[in-house]
Amino acid sequence: MLAIAFRFVAGRYHATPWGQHVNEADVEWPPSLWRLLRALVAVWHRKLDHEDYPESRLVELIEALSEVDPLYQLPAAVHAHSRHYMPAPQRTALVFDAFLRVDRKSDLVVAWPGVALQTEPLRLLDVLLENLGYLGRAESWVEARRLKHWTEDQANCRPGVLSLHPESGQALEPVRLLVPVPASQYDDWRAETRQQLNLEAVPPARRRRIAATLPENLLGALRLETGAVREAGWSRMPGSQEQIYQRPAGSLATQALLRSFPREAPKQGAVTLRFAMAGKPLPRLENAVRLGELMRAAMMHRIRRRMGEDALPAALSGHGMGRNNRHGHAFFLPEDADDDGRIDHMILHVPVGLPPQVVLHLAGLSRLFEPGGAEWSLVLEESLDLAAAGKACPGPLLQHSRQWVSTTPYLHPWHAKRGLDAARQLQRECRLRGLPEPEVSWLPELVIRGRPRRTVHFRRFRSRRGLTQPDTRGRFARLSFPEAIQGPLALGFGCHFGLGLFRAETLPEQQE
C-alpha cells in the first residue's frame, strides 16, 4: 500500500474548500485528493529538472494516484480563526481567516490501498515530496515523506455513507471532497461533457473559453487556472467529481468544544454554546425575537441535512417534550455584549442537554441569514459548563448575580386576572423553574446607546401564526433575587427566542 505522511511544521493548515467563500470560515479537512495532486504537479513545474524527470513519468504517477480514492489518518486538530479589516483605500471589509491548529509532531497520513508504483514513478514521487514546501495556502508549511509501513486499520477517515464506525461505534460526520475522475475514465467523461454542453450551439468566444478548459488528459485538467475555469462558467473544476468521506465527529471542533465534549466518551448534559456574530450592519437589539427564530431554523435545518429528520431532538425543536417540561428545551438568545444596541453574539442554551453528536454538528454553524435579506457570519466562541464556570462565564447574559434588568420586553405568559397580575406571573415563573422569587420593579423605558427605548420600539410578536399571546404590550423590569442565580434568564412569552431576556446588572466583582 502506498502511504504518504504530511507534518505541518508551523502547526497551522489553511485551505478553503472549493465553492465556499473565505468568510464562511470553513477549512477543507482532510485535504482533498484534487488538492494533493495539484500540489505535486506544481512542484514538478517549479522545482524539478524536466530532463531528469520527464512529463511522461508525471503522467504515469498522477494517473495511478487518480484511480483509487485514498484513506486518511487525521491527527487531532482545532478549528481557529483570525479577523481583520482589509486596508484602505480598497474595500475595508471584515475578513475571517480560518485555519486549523495541528500538533507539529503529528502526521496526516494519506494512503492508496492496492496501489503499487513502478520504480521510476516512485522515485519521482519521493523527489516531489522532498521539494513540497506547503499544502493549501503558502502559510501551511509541510514536510512530506513516503511511509514504508502503514496498515489500513489505522485510517479514521474514508469514503462512505456510514454515520457510525462499524467497529468502534465512534460517531462520524460527512464531508464532501473533490477527487479527480479516474484517468481510465477521463476520455469518456470528456466526450460525454462535450456532448452535454453542445458546444456547436455556443457562441464562438464562449466556445473557445470552454474548449480551453477541457484538456485532452487528466494532467491538463489539474493544470487549469481557477480564474479561467470560473470565466468559462464551471461550478466545479473540470475533470473532478465530489466524493463523500466520513471523518470523526468533531474533527474541526474548537478547543472550547473539545474540552466540554471529549471525543472518546462524551456524555449528554446541559449545553451552552456562545457564537460570535459578524456582519454589516449587525442586527438591532430591538429585533431580538426575529434573530432567535432564525437561529432555531438554521440549527434545525443543519441537523436535518446532516443527520436526517429522525435525528432531530425534541429538546432542540421544542416539540414533543411533554407536559412536565419546565422550559428544559432550547433557548436561542441574542446578546449585545458591548452594549452598543447591536446583537453581536448568539447563545444556544439547552438545560436538558443534547446528544454529543448533535452538539458537534451545531457547533459548526457558520451563518445566519434573513431569506432574501441580510446575512451574518457565526463562529463558535465558547462551549460552557455553566455549573462549573459559575462567576467566570463571559457576557452579561451568563453571569452569576442577584440583580437582573430587562434587555428585551417581558410579556406575561398567562391572561391577567385578580391575584395574577404581571408581577405575580413573573414570580410564579421563577418559582416553577426552581428559582427564588424576586422583588419586581417596573421600568418605564430602557436607554440603548443614549436613546430612550420603550416596548413599542421592540418587535414583540413571533412569526408563527395562531399563537396565544396574552400580553402584546410588554414591560421592562428590574429583578432583585434574595440570592445570586446563574444566567441565562429569559421569562414570559417568547422567552426561548429572546423576549423577556434579562442581563446581570451587577457583575460578580461588584457584589463582593
Image: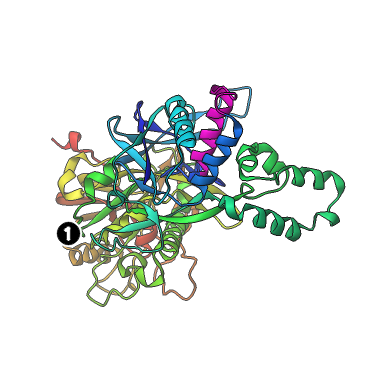
Secondary structure that dominates the magenta span: helix
Q: Which residue is mark 1?
A: 435
Q: How is the image coloured?
A: rainbow
Q: Residue at x 33, y 44 (%)?
A: 74
SS at mark 1 in the image: loop
Where's residue 54, x and y in %?
59, 30
Question: 224 or 181, which is in the foreground?
Answer: 181
Residue 163: where, in percent of width, then height? Answer: 35, 63
| Residue 85 spot, x, y in % from top left | 52, 28
Q: Nearer the viewer, residue 295 or 45?
A: 45
Residue 409 visible in this rendered orientation of the protein: no
330 or 288, which lies in front? 330
Q: Position of residue 415 (x, y in %)?
A: 34, 74
> Which residue range is magenta in the image?
34-53
Q: Is residue 2 magenta?
A: no
Asked if the stretch drawn in magenta spans residue 38, the answer is yes
- Vertical side of 427 occupied by 323: above or below: below
